[in-house]
Amino acid sequence: MLEIYNTLTRDKQEFAPIVPGKAGMYVCGMTVYDYCHLGHARVLVVFDMVYRWLKASGYDVTYVRNVTDIDDKIIKRAAENNESIHVLTQRFIDAMHEDADALGVQRPDHEPRATQYVPQMLEMIATLESNGLAYRAADGDVNYAVRKFDGYGKLSGKSLEDLRAGERVEVTGSKNDPLDFVLWKHAKDQESDEVKWDSPWGKGRPGWHIECSAMGSKLLGEHFDIHGGGADLQFPHHENEIAQSEGAHQCQYVNYWMHNGFVRVDEEKMSKSLGNFFTIREVLKKYDAEVVRFFILRAHYRSPLNYSDMHLDDAKGALTRLYTALKGAVVGRDLSRHDTVGLKPDLQEYGGVDWSEPYAARFKAAMDDDFNTPEAVAVLFDLANEVNRSQSAEAAAQLKALAGVLGLLQRDPQVFLQGGAGEGGLDDAAIGAQIEVRIAAKKAKNFAEADRIRKELLDAGIVLEDSASGTTWRRA
RNA sequence: GGCGAGAUAGCAAAAUGGUUAUGCAGCGGAUUGCAAAUCCGCCUAUCCCAGUUCGAUUCUGGGUCUCGCCUCCA
């Protein structure tokens, strides 16, 4: 039985979908004016993991992850680059897809762009206005009247009084209450036509918060199961979404709110404003994408995750152990002939996993406990030990199948273990040739020469492993 | 200032009212021409102070420290 930690109630709750057998999930995606950084990678991977586990659990899942392609920063960046909004956003949407694909992130079922849902937003703003929750301010913006919505603060645990008392809430000109937020921003003369839409309140563009409310309810309904995003979106973004959606539809918006923890650098949140971020593509130049995915899934999704080369190296070593176990199983029993580890279709798909098998049962229990991936990964290591010990084809197949649920260990072990050749590194042929020379030296009992070659390769980052069946190599 | 999360071995990271987490590193052994990989064994923990309890890392209270949100942010 799946339990999910719900930010709304601040405890774990059994997952009970609105429609039995189905699950609707919305995750706040990227604002596309730059490359994704590791913090974005975490959201992508974490909710991909959630998506996969829901599907593995038999739910018919509809996963929506939006793209914000209209916003102040986008407008600013496009102006700086002297290019159109569309050209800018499309470029970064393409880049985001490249990064997500590399990390093994499955595409969501829907990836709505804000600019395609302006009519739905206008409709919603009109409803809010007629419900007495929105007003047109003197400067032409349409704002949400926060104090008119009773439940405001229920997600973030803040009261309006607390918020008002906060030193950092500034009173801005045309708002009735400093906490009111913009639903519709009136157009400014100097802005290009590309960022102006007609509306009953004059030309303008949508505020950020209304985008998600509109896209969510359009694609998943006015009331859906799961809404996710980074912990920093809890307030005000998700709080405002609730105010908008529930204020407009007069029904509960979302049942389970999930928030992932931050990626940190030196114990500090990684963010654009702090300038301490690493882009995904930057990190992928140095580390295998699966190592990055493993690094993310090795921690619980709600915990902070410190980024450093040392931690990535550690993750790489750990993942190497898992792949080594699979490789050993193939070599030891020639599983490929029986197609067990390779591509056995029924085990490739989640449905093929026998969840009553002890390791699988432990894995499932961990995942059902609020997506406890560290525990699930620990099961993978126990299984790897079992594979190494028994050389059991079944255990190896199980290891690959369970890891597959997390989007891990699906590549040919050899490809993983021998991958990562940097520029100037030895190519496979050169390594093979050296190995042949060394084998000849060994046959001639010229161990000094054999050791010299091994040392030479090791210095080049190549580790040789002699076994009864021959010499294999991997990159350190 | 308000609100929230957290403090576990050398590092990372789970769980648990009493019994092995797990990975990396380290130590000893097996194996190996020597290694590597693997296996077996071992070593390092539960921030501080009270309380509840037969027993607390785990529950309660207080303290210290860290981080986050309150402004765009995944």
Image (tube, coloured by chain):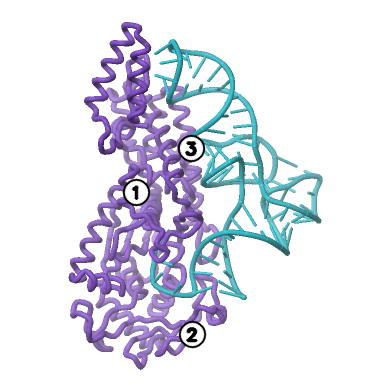
- State the separation of the CA atoms marked 3 and 1: 28 Å
| Residue A325: % across, % down | 40, 28
Q: Is residue A221 above or below residue A55?
A: below
Q: Is residue A22 visible?
A: no
Amino acid type indicated by mark 2: Arg
Residue at 21% over, 66% down: A88
SS category of the residue bearing label 2: helix
Residue A379 — which label?
Answer: 3
Which tint was used for chain A? purple
Query: Disc 2 designates what residue?
Result: A147
Q: CA distance from mark 2 to mark 1?
A: 45 Å
Q: Regarding mark 3 in the picture, which secondary structure is present there?
A: helix
Amino acid residing under circle 3: Val
Q: Position of residue A174 (x, y in %)?
A: 40, 90
Task: Give coordinates of residue B48: x percent, y percent.
Answer: 73, 52
Q: Nearer the viewer, residue A139 or A120?
A: A139
